[in-house]
Image: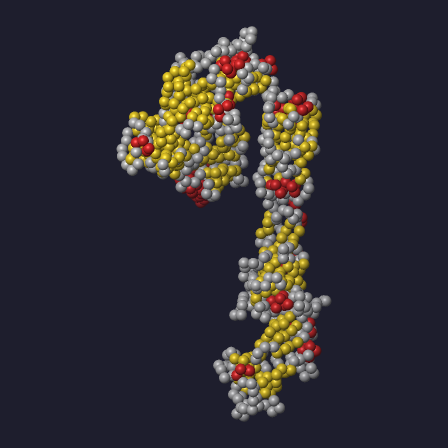
Amino acid sequence: MKKKFYGALLLGSVLLTGGMVSCSDYDDDINSLNDRVAAVEETVKGLQEKINAGCVITSVDPTENGVKVTLSNGESFELLNGAPGAAATVEIGENGNWFINGKDTGKPSRGEKGEQGEPGDSGTAATGKYYKPGENGYWIEVTVGADGKETETETTISWTPEGTMTAVWDSENGKLLVSNVKGYNGILSISLTSELKSLVFQPEFYYQGIEAMEAKTFNYTEKGVKEVNADDDFTTDAPTELDGVAMTPGLVAKYHMNPSSANWKDIKSLSYISDDKNYTRAGGVVKANVFDWEGEEGILTVHSQLTDGTIKDIQNDGKVTVLALQANYSGSEKDTIITSDYAAVKATNYKDMVLANAALGQPVHTMHLYTNAQDAINNAASHEIVWNHEGLDVATLVQTHYNDSQNSHVAWDVTAADKTVEDYGFKYSFELVGYHKGNNRTSESAHAVMKGSLLKPCMPVDGKQPTWDAAEQNKAEKDREPLVRVILTDTVSNKIAAVGYVKFKIVEKATPTESEVILTPEFGFNYEYTVNCTETEKPLQIEWHDFEEDILAQLEKQGISKEDFHTNFELDGRNDDATQYDGKLATSMSTSKKGIVKQTITDTGAEETQIITWTLKNNEAYQLFKNNKSISVIVRYSKEIEPNVYQFVYVTLTWTPNPRNVQPAGTLENSDKIKNYWYAYNSATPGSGYSDIHANVETVGETNADDEFKSDILNTFDGNNVTVSGVNAVYTAFQDANLTKTFTFVDPQSTDMTPVKGNSGTMYDITVSDNGTTLYANVVNNPLVKQAVVKINGSILEYQGKDNETQYSFARDILNAADHAQFVANNEGKKTFTAQIQINAENCSYVPFELENNEFFAKFLRPITISDPHETNFVDATTGGAKADLKLTFVDWRDHNFDNASVTKGQNYYKYYDVESIAQNGDIMTDLNGTTGVFDRKLSDVTGKVKFTFTAPTKSEIQNGNGIVNHYFGTLNYENNGTTVGDFQIKVPFDVTYDWGTIQVYVICKISQTEAN
């Protein structure tokens, strides 16, 4: 239906233009529109499936393209913006009001029952009111009657501003509503809840090992009270004691809902299955009738009343009463009955209820309220209230005590304001009790008004108490002492359980007996932060009018004048560098500083006012913001009331940057590399990829070349410079021109680049220096002896070991292990030495710059390779003895043959690479008396009569020849044992030493059978 509707809209728009379009254009538009619709439907389907599976939404955040919905399992879904404006979010704030983009709308999101009307005013009752977003885009005003009945009225106020994508996260009513979604017409509604699958009892305690709930019975003596008012004289007011009452208000049980996101509002009814069990089995008659329930954060709280039978007790009856909760749940397809596990009910008795001051930390028995008006009047006031207080909640000052089932006298609730007693059928009420002091004709209590539990000082009108709304305040109220009567009522039996009296003294300002915090204003800043590697400072200033409104005006309400604050309150520390604190308590301690907070004075033209400025240097702010979305500092003003007794004003400054730019990043494009210098991984073909570069010694014949192994990485980049691109323009300090690029080795540990095998067969472990510029080698299992192999000096790769056999013997052994083209390990496990290199870019060392595509491999090509041309051969029994000049083939890292004039071009490669010696070193192996070509036995083991000796060449003979040949490598002499012999071969090991170390080469010599035999 939605797709057809969209099609109709599109057609209408085409016709209205008066233009002509082709069928194909129209089909393309329809297909594109259908694709967008399908994309939205698929996103919503996936989101709803996750919620139905038990996930809950943890955040709804604006993005550049729309809004992102994040679930409790970490997954997120994005709904794209179909409107030209920016996205907005609507959600419930901590105070219960609706907030749009963090700003309080003043509209409450939840309502309370209205207060009951006065007796005789049947048909009228005060009402509560709240708002919820409607699925048509307008706020719905919900009026809650005294009986809890709700009436909904649609307003004309839109929660979705025109031309703006808006998401309402309505967790109270279980909906996510999104307007102006790309590809969706109207308000998109997504259920935040899932269907209830099971209920699991949450035990209060274990009753002889059984999960149990408590059925409290409250024993008290009913109190009778007379009607009082604030104007007349009730000095002798006191409750009278009536009959004893034992009231069992019922049960309060909690159940885990599965899943926790289940919508408890879909529960149509709840009931209990009851039974009396023998401590092994039996039957019973107690009934529990459910009268109310509510859910929050996956917990269903059920209130019920007990009727009929008696709760059984294991110790006395040998039985236990058990209950299982049954929920009639309205599911998406059909109603379902869901039953919880059974839980035991344990009857307990509570008695001697008495009202008390909620002064924490005092012995319980010393906190009780006076039980008659006369005692409260005759004694000092329990509490002070400043003359211009807008409403002190007396409920926060009182609580109820009782003797529990263990006969311990304990506090039942923390304060009356937490409404703990309401779960058990009790409620508090508060009223002023009039009385006259001396010859005063006006009652002390007429100097105050009450609204519910709120107490507000005021001036009487014609000697009588005014109404709350008409009450005016004046310092003349000072020293008056209104009296409040507190009543605890059993709402089940409508009887009074306890009465107490509290006297207040109206003061110009509160007099502390110990240090106290009197104000904790908070100021927020959302200025952008961008890291820039400088010492530039960002001053965040509380404007004078904010200081006036949020500090001075609030102190005025407590009776502290602006003059008093300016004169007597001092900023802790110094005005130019205030002390910073770890909290906002009277006992808070100083902490390490974040920037500097200082106080200055501003002249507004009419008067002077303090100004607080918080200054952070950019680099210090980065250290704080790199891991935190916001940072706060707390400073305080102090006034000494008396020695070591202070009043404190804590000022919190919070910077939440929007945006917070702390992660500069860029990339190295392959297009910045000279393609012909680069290779695919382990490839020998230039231009095949951008993974490898090949490092080599200097080329023979180039100016000043002397066979150094130095290779400049920058030679492989366009313009011989590394260029970083793709950096967000906001990071001006991290654009390419401002970046310093360096090269370091990547740690080879846990890769196939270590260990490596040297020419000698020794295994070496490769490690990297702390600064990343040197690769080291140590013989495996001997980490204490390590030698440098290759270093990075700037952009120059410098292989170590030329002409030095001692300090760099490991490097020489590794370099000469394999041919320059042996990129993959041969059958001996040897390959060209490879290192991984990383390009780093930074402006300042303390800001990590994330660089993509910045790693590559460098292969260090062995300078020369020596091979056997199989031309060193002998004929047995040759006259004068068999001799043969050693034949070897030398090529360099370019495969240039040292004896090929077309490539050497007159250069003496032997001299350039300083080939200085050839020595026969190691056992001669043979296939004599074995399989041809298999050299598995030492010649000396087969026979001691056949001998080979080697006449080594001099360095000059190798490099310059000996007159007979241009380059002489020495002569092998063969001696027979005097017996004719057939063909066989020997394998002779030679060590060839040049300026970069020693290469071992094996020469296979063929000995032909004895002449003429």
Q: Is residue 436 visible?
A: yes
Q: Position of residue 939 (x, y in %)?
A: 55, 82
Residue 481 lies, with reference to residue 534, above or below; the image says above
Q: Position of residue 43 (x, y in %)?
A: 44, 42
The number of numbered discs placed on residues in the rendered structure image is 0
Residue 120 lies, with reference to residue 292, above or below; the image says above
Residue drawn at 46 percent across, 38 percent down? 57
Q: Is residue 36 visible?
A: no
Q: Position of residue 568 (x, y in %)?
A: 67, 24
Residue drawn at 48 percent across, 81 percent down? 931
Q: Residue furthest left?
A: 283
Residue drawn at 54 percent across, 59 percent down? 751
Q: Residue furthest bottom?
A: 1012
Q: Position of residue 197 (x, y in %)?
A: 36, 38
Q: Nearer the viewer, residue 921 or 356?
A: 356
Q: Nearer the viewer, residue 135 or 612?
A: 612
> Residue 254: which quarter of the image?
top left
> Residue 898: which quarter of the image?
bottom right
